[in-house]
Image (cartoon, rainbow, N blue to C red):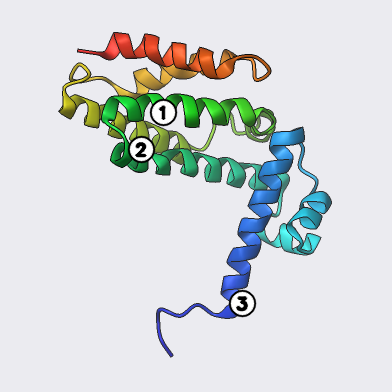
Amino acid sequence: MTTGSVSPRRADTRRNHERILVAAGESLARTGEVSFNAIAKQAEVGVGTVYRHFPTPESLILAVYQREVRHIVDIVPVLLDKHGPAEAFRVWVTDHLAHYMMTKKGLADALRRATASRGELPASAYESMIGAMAALLEANEAAGTVRPGLDPVVVLRGLAGLLLLDPGGDWRGEAASLAELLWHGMAR
């Protein structure tokens, strides 16, 4: 028996888990609601499978949120490889962070409801976002395009204005304007 092999059952479990998250993410983005029956149907799994992976709607909503944040965070090194640091910052803000905020409004509403009893979002997701911003700032500081010593938390707070954009309006242009304004405050 090899230690690197994955049993067919375990691989199937991972596939089902991912299919459930994709279906739930689409449902939450569209309606802001979690229906285990509808998600099971869309994911082509039994409703019992959904409950086995996610015993409560809150656990499913949090898992979808963490998956979405992981995508936003994981793109940063790709952007830094593909673009210069300044352009990577702008692309991340407008094409990834703002896009997420504008197309996942239903998820945001569901997340607020799911975390109402806990009072806050999962710390690991927030810390991941801080890490992503820190990577962008470090690359820009090394390139001499931003002032040294910028706090990634403060920069993320500056981007909170993205939450006020209208998903039905020219949010891309407005996000680019916000990124440009913030950039001028950070630039050397």
Label whose residue precedes the other's in the sequence (2 or 1):
2
Quadrant housing residue 61: top right
* Residue in the image at 45% along x and 80% along y: 5
What amino acid type should be assigned to the residue bearing mark 3?
A: Arg
Residue 176: % across, % down:
46, 16
Q: Marks 3 and 1: in contact by CB < 8 Å?
A: no
Callout 2 environment at 10 Å: few (<14), some (14 to 19), or many (20+)?
A: some
| Residue at the limit of the structure toward the bottom, as seen here | 1
- Res 47 → quadrant: bottom right
Mark 1 vs mark 3: which is more N-terminal? 3
Q: Which residue is mark 2?
A: 79
Percent x, y of residue 11: 57, 72
Residue 166 visible? The answer is: yes
Look at 77% across and 34% down and name the residue there: 31
Q: Relative to the observer, which residue lies in front, 138 or 66? A: 138
Check the image and report above or below for 54 versus 115.
below
* Left or right: 164 as drawn, with respect to 36: left
The answer to which of marks 3 and 2 sits earlier in the sequence is 3
Q: Which residue is mark 1?
A: 91
Residues at discs 2 and 1 in contact (Cβ within 8 Å): yes
Q: Which residue is mark 3?
A: 9
Q: Amino acid at mark 1?
A: Val
Disc 1: CA contacts within 10 A as few (<14), some (14-19) or many (>=20)? some
Horizontal and vertical percent position of residue 79: 36, 38
**Vertical order, 102 against 181 (above or below):** below
